[in-house]
Amino acid sequence: MGTDRGHDLPPAAYVAGMVHLVPDHPDWLACLLRQLTPAELWGRLTAGDAEGLRALAGAPAPVRQRLRLLAPRAAQVDLRARWARHEELGVTVTWQGQVSYPVRLLDDPDPPPVLFARGDLGLLGSSPLLAMIGTRRCTPYGRDVARELADTLTRAGVHIVSGLALGIDGAAHEGVLRAFRASKCGAASSAVAAPIGVVGSGLDRVYPRRHRSLWEAVGDLGLLLTEAPLGGAPEPWRFPERNRIIAGLADAVLVVESHPAGGSMVTVRLAMDRDKPILAVPGPIRSSASRGTNRLIGDFATLVQDEHDVFVALGLATSGQRGTPVEHRTAPLGAASRVLDALGWEPASAEQLAVRTALSLGDVACSLYELAASGWVTDAGGWWQRCVAP
Amino acid sequence: MLATIPSATVLGADGRPVTVEVHVSNGLPCYTIVGLPDAACRESRDRVRAAVMSSGCPWPSRRVTVNLAPSGLRKGGSGLDLAIAIGVLVATGELPGEAVADHAFVGELGLDGGVRRVPGLVPMVDAIDTRFVVVPAACAAEAELVGRHHVRSASTLREVLDALIGLDGWPDPPPAPPPEGPDRSVDLAEVRGQQMAREALELSAAGGHHLLLIGPPGAGKTMLARRLPGLLPALWPADALEATRIHSAAGLPLPAGGLVRHPPFRAPHHSASAVSLIGGGSSWMRPGEISCAHRGVLFLDELGEFPVSVLDQLRQPLEEGVIRVSRARESIAFPARFLLVAAMNPCPCGAGIAPGTCDCTEQARARYARRLSGPLLDRFDLRVPVTLPEPSAVLGPPDGECTDVVAARVAVARAIAAARGVECNAELPAAELDEWAPLTPGARRLVSVRLEQGLLTARGYDRVRRVARTLVDLGGDDGPLDEAAVSLALLLRADVGLGSIPRAA
């Protein structure tokens, strides 16, 4: 008998307990949830009715062994305490068959049986929804582009979903948050979209740790989703699983920067399996971080240079209505202008710029700091990079 | 009968005067030595006895007591042998007391009566106050360096005795080899490309600013560092003597001519223990590598491989110019004012100097960056990325300036700094920077923008001014600091490679 089969616990509590017992979401769990209410299922599990459950699930014989082993463990789970923790953190649970389950995932070839959410699940009903993904080892160019595009698209009402990973994902979320917060401060614009993130660990296990404040912000202002139960560690096998959810939720997938092989390519393949269009941002041919995206563009992906290309791909605009971007920064003069031209769009060191412009190192340094003060360039670790926007 | 002979011993990097008292009295033949001698001193009994007998003098078969005063000071090494032998001979009456008046004796004795050299002769002679000092012939040139004594030298105990009695004159010391010039084996012109690193090297030499070279393996960091001593001017006489004393105390071989004239270059391996680097030791307090690099260059190659605990111990000497080593028994301050040059890779794989080229994981990069603590990194005023040179530069003819040309400019800059009362600009006190390093209005604007944005701290501002001052001095100018100089100083202080891990939110 399980501790506390009190009927005052909501069904979600039983589902949460079940996922805690079998975090790898076997198929028979989904099947059983369709046929029994969670409270009934829990009761039969703790009673040790392995045979009966196996028959209901139509699962093969070895599953019976597993079910039998689960019974004593189930008896030790304190459902009430676990559910209290969920409520404390503001985590809700949804599973296939529930009204709150995302409509977008109903037709998915491999839908997640149970999802844990923090925030407004209703956001998933908005349209359009664009996934922005990319490599963890990105360049300042990729980060800038991701942030700017996410900012602009969010202001235009496109919802962005990403994985809260280091690199491009983080930059995309930053851009969304910047636009979201700016809209809250200025004239209220209901068209501005909220951030959405899908992660691979439990909602109480922030990973990566550096993104703690990003987690909090996305969870408070938008929606955080995961398949992992509370306390689930960010194990490597969870991340491809998380990528399939992103691919399933999105209307289109935009890859900002990617090396030839990586997690972003996995997501691209999963999106292609689901017939979602793939978009990609090109990059310098010598940059290893753009090698994957450039190849995607060559093969089948749509090229994205600004938000207008995204609108066309999402069906929000027709091509040919391009506007000219407005430049707010003051144009540089003299030596500074030569240095800016010589900089190009790839990161360069001061020494390389001195060679290219034939100026002395002192003059180059002077120009670089002048350009930095007016927002044309930024420096990271001694390498100077032209900024997309101030 | 009692004899009192002045001598000296070495403690740390300084000599301490020792008075050897020998008392010979009736009693069963024995020989005792008191006054905290160490093992080498205690063994002197057999050496002195054999040497005296080999020189044709009788050894007293009475009770001999030797006291090394002051009794509370530990005496180390075998430099007291000669003084003990002379003391025994005076106490037994073999040698008249007036003959050794105002003479001090330093030297080790061999069983054949030969007088042998001892390490640390220069600080020992420096601590002696008598007019005459008798030293081994091989060390005569070193003893002359101190300059305050009449140096007498001999190669055997018999020669010493004959000269003291007046039977023979003092033998002439062997001719001193001519002093050698600066090391000409390496030249700056051999470095291909690397414009920024060369400028930084020149700045470092001219202003005494610590230099950190970061780059992938094979870029030329070690090559550049080894060409730095050639750019530095010769030591001033007082500094040369100080450096010679330290090298002598550390037991290092002195250059030909005895005096350390050129800034020393020390490059300890990263497996060196903390004690060998900083100084100390349990029985004999020995100057470490940082003291041997006093007034010279300390080069730490592969900075990332040094243990963190060892690097942290460098912070105090970098700030104060002296290292205080304390043991239970005593505490000694070694001078340690050196120019620190270090080379390291930007990340464990070595390739990540440019963004996006590195194969290391985030944790590996972060772990590697943590090895250099913030305060230590802050001591480096010049942080320069050294990238692999272009193939055209490597294959082409050398096109850079040679050591002599750059050294001339460095000498001019150092002379300008000397007029301000410091040896180099890195030593300019913060209070005087406003007077010596004023900014032009354009430079002031640039600096205030950085300060407002929080990209520059007040301490960083002082350091940037010193480097900019050196930049302007190198141009032969004594005026205020302009924008170009201040911008370049800021650029050279930028965090390179390490610490540029991307941050989100």
Image: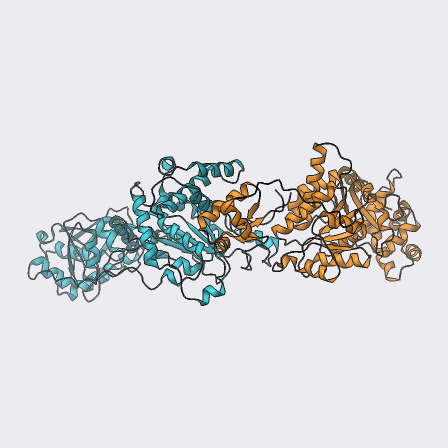
Chain colours: A orange, B cyan
Asked if A105 appears above or below B47 in the picture, the reply is above
Residue sitting nearer the eye, B260 or B273: B260
Q: Is residue B326 in sight in this rendering? A: no
Q: Is residue B453 left or right of residue A237?
A: left
Residue B482 in sight from this viewpoint: yes
Q: Along the line of sight, which residue is nearer the eye, B171 or B93?
A: B171
B18 left or right of A293 in image: left
Q: What is the count of numbered marks?
A: 0
Residue A307 image offset from top left, x and y in percent: 72, 47
User: Which residue occupies the foreground of this view, B92 or B500?
Assistant: B500
Which of the 4 image quarters holds residue B56? bottom left
Image quarter (top left, top right, bottom left or bottom right) of the C terminus of chain A: top right
Determine whether B346 is above or below B473 in the image: below
Q: Nearer the viewer, residue B171 or B145?
A: B145
Question: Which residue is depicted at the point 61% across and 58% down?
Answer: A287
Residue B463 at x, y percent in the picture: 43, 42
**Percent x, y of residue B169:** 8, 60
In the displayed orientation, state which residue is furthest to the left: B167
Q: Quadrant of residue A218?
A: top right
| Whole-percent x, y for residue A383 in the image | 54, 51
